[in-house]
Image (cartoon, helix red, strand yellow):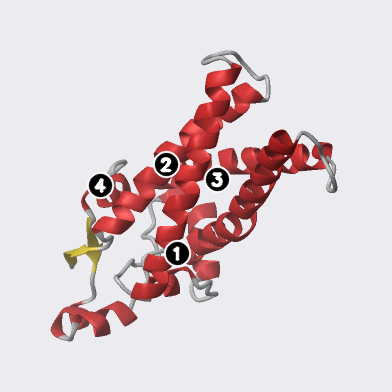
Amino acid sequence: MKQTIRLFSRFEIFWHWSQAVLIFAMLITGFELHGSYGLLGYGLSASVHVACAVALMLVWVFAVFWHFATGEWRQYVPTTRKLAAVAEFYARGIFKGEEHPFRPSRVRKHNPIQLVAYLIYNVIVSPAIWITGLLYLAYSMIGVAPWPPLSAVAFVHVAAAYATVVFVIGHVYMITTGETVFQHLKAMLTGFEAVEVAPEDTAGSARAGDRES
């Protein structure tokens, strides 16, 4: 049976959408700075890009504090439980209309494949963008490029930007894989989602039910 639960807190909703706006703004202005097209002009794009980068880092500082203060950091601890089943579902079962093997809950909101994607993006891609972006900014401010060379910094920064594009495309695609196209999008807008709960879960406590997911 299905039960509607609050899956995401108000802060998680704010964190998600503020990241989305800032990341899209940084991608648009970043690729213009890279010379891919002309839209805002180099000067305005550079100003917007830096402002969004600073804002994103501030959002992340608050997010890291919130996750550790509330214990929600545990949501992102990778697990191999149901990893093979979820991988098989996305490779084959989803195209046959099979039921998703993972049930989200307050204790475990993200399936094992999502956790791997978030881990790679949050631990590797995002820090690579921040570090190289700060180095790029420092080089422009002091007027000299010490070690590491600017060419290497630029290469890593652009590579991380393309990795972000891949992550965003995959993330948007995953939104459409619910029972309806907007099921997961609605959950991130309202915080609530109707999830499948076993009968024995509803008879016990909410936490006990979550452990079954």
The residue pinned by badge 2 equals 20
Residue 176 seen in render:
no
Viewer-nearest of labels 3 and 1? 1
Q: Find the distance from the CA under tag 3 to the CA under tag 2.
A: 12 Å
Viewer-nearest of labels 3 and 2? 2
Q: Find the distance from the CA under tag 3 to the CA under tag 1.
A: 20 Å
* Element type at mark 3: helix
Q: Earlier in the sequence, mark 3 or mark 1?
A: 1
Q: Find the distance from the CA under tag 1 to the CA under tag 4.
A: 21 Å
Viewer-nearest of labels 2 and 4? 2
Q: Earlier in the sequence, mark 3 or mark 2?
A: 2
The residue pinned by badge 4 equals 189
For badge 2, the amino acid type reads Ala
For badge 3, the amino acid type reads Phe
The residue pinned by badge 1 equals 64
Q: What is the quadrant of residue 122 in the picture?
A: bottom right
Circle 1 Cα neighbour tier, 10 Å, few/some/many (<14 / 14–19 / ≥20): few
Pick the front one: 145 or 56: 145
**Residue at coordinates 34% horizontally, 74% vertically from top-left?**
70
For badge 4, the amino acid type reads Leu
The reply to whether discs 3 and 2 touch (Cβ–Cβ < 8 Å) is no
